[in-house]
Amino acid sequence: MTTREEREQELERAGYNLFNVPGPRVLVDLLTDSGTGAMSSEQWAGLQRGDESYAGSASWFRFRDAVQELFPFEHVIPTHQGRAAEKILFSALGGEGRTIPNNTHFDTTRANVEFSGAEALDLPVSAALVPSTLHPFKGNMDVDALRRVLAEADVPVVFVTVTNNSGGGQPVSIENLRAVREACDAAGVPLFLDACRFAENAWFVKLREDGYADTPVADIVREMASLADGMTMSAKKDPLGNIGGWLALNDDGLAEQCRNLLILTEGFPTYGGMAGRDMDALAQGLREAVDEDYLRYRIRSTAYLGEALDRAGIPVVLPVGGHAVYIDARAFLPQIPPLEYPGQALAVALYLEGGIRGCEIGTVMFGRQPDGSEQPAAMDLVRLAIPRRTYTQSHVDYVIEVCEYVAERAAELRGLEIVEQPPVLRHFTARFAPLRS
Ligand SMILES: Cc1ncc(COP(=O)(O)O)c(C=O)c1O
């Protein structure tokens, strides 16, 4: 617990960037669902079984088999987290003059594509850009737009992110994935999944897509994998790990190129960036991730928060996503223009009033263009991400009360300006100053 006055000082010290606030000064930490979940007793048992042989450890084989059980790609390349898989893949496939489409690139994916010299292009369906529009699969890709891009641009790979994190944690239907696959086949271009939240996506397919109500979630995951040529993965999300990731693919030549890059920066191909014990914890986490009782609890508890905010008149992305509730800060704070960062202003207010840490997903995160200019992002959201198996309903009830309290004072909130920023991924380290009028 901290007092409001302490949090005021903390914000000043942190340059109004919640990434700079120490964890012990946060009461309910909804900054991310990445690596912040609680491991199960069986995962802790896995840690104890960890085999730390440098090459070919028993843990590696258990990990590889658990990955291939759900994602039967030929090659599994372990990395320390998702962005390492992205860096390796885009080093091999990216480069000047190329375009890499996605339903919506997440921050590190976009940054790694752009770092390679390629263009990162978002092609969400139009419903994805209107927070209040109800649509069962707002994570879908605009397939007509994809076909046009495939006809005109030099596209080395198409990505689909499941669920679509930047777009509100929204799922992608199997029907849409199949249509994307057909467009890729027609153009002779491979399709990869950014599969961080594959199990949540599959659960939404089971609930919402015709013909899947009786299909086990694990089978839906395998069907998603069967439509792709490879995947990047942050194992800090659905696989219930605190660290880890992988790149998996079928193409032998590309896999060899990627393994060579892996050895350069991550490690030997049977551990990549992970300890043996991490790989054992993930092998178990992958089995738990597709447990349908767990998924029912997980998705309902996120919806509980979203539905309560919606009932209180707080604008949220609807329907509520899988791993997070996204407040539409542009609608919540209409007096703050996008270039004065309404999402950042709201995230700061939630911390100041209640010690809750959320994450701006808007113009701070995506507004800066590769040429250094600035434009409003498609949406200005504040993501309240729910760590897996971590908080109780009473914590969430407290979050609801704080959001309602801030909503009553919304008209008083003002925007911010950036006073210091790095050239890429600025949201992690930028410093801000409040605007007073
Ligand atoms: C959709 C998506 N892709 C990639 C990543 C990057 O993963 P990591 O943080 O493990 O590097 C994230 C992390 O939040 C993500 O949500």
Image (tube, rainbow, N blue to C red):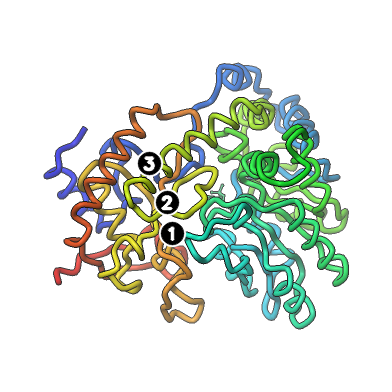
- Circles 2 and 3, Cβ within 8 Å, touching? The answer is no
Q: Nearer the viewer, mark 1 or mark 3?
A: 3
The residue at which mark 3 appears reads as 308
Q: How far is disc 1 from disc 3 in space, using C-alphas?
A: 21 Å
Q: How far is disc 2 from disc 1 in space, using C-alphas?
A: 7 Å
Where is residue 24 drawn, in percent x and y?
A: 29, 35
Taking the view exactly as shown, the residue that stands out farthest to the left is 5
Q: Which of the 4 image quarters holds residue 112?
A: bottom right
The residue at which mark 1 appears reads as 361
Looking at marks 1 and 3 on the same chain, the residue that comes earlier in the sequence is marked by: 3
340 over 166 or under it: above or below? below
Quick one: 166 or 22, which is closer to the camera? Answer: 166
Q: Residue at x 43, y 81 (%)?
A: 373
The residue at which mark 2 appears reads as 383
The amino acid type found where label 1 is placed reads Ile
Where is residue 101 drawn, in percent x and y?
A: 67, 68
Q: Which of the 4 image quarters holds residue 58?
A: top right
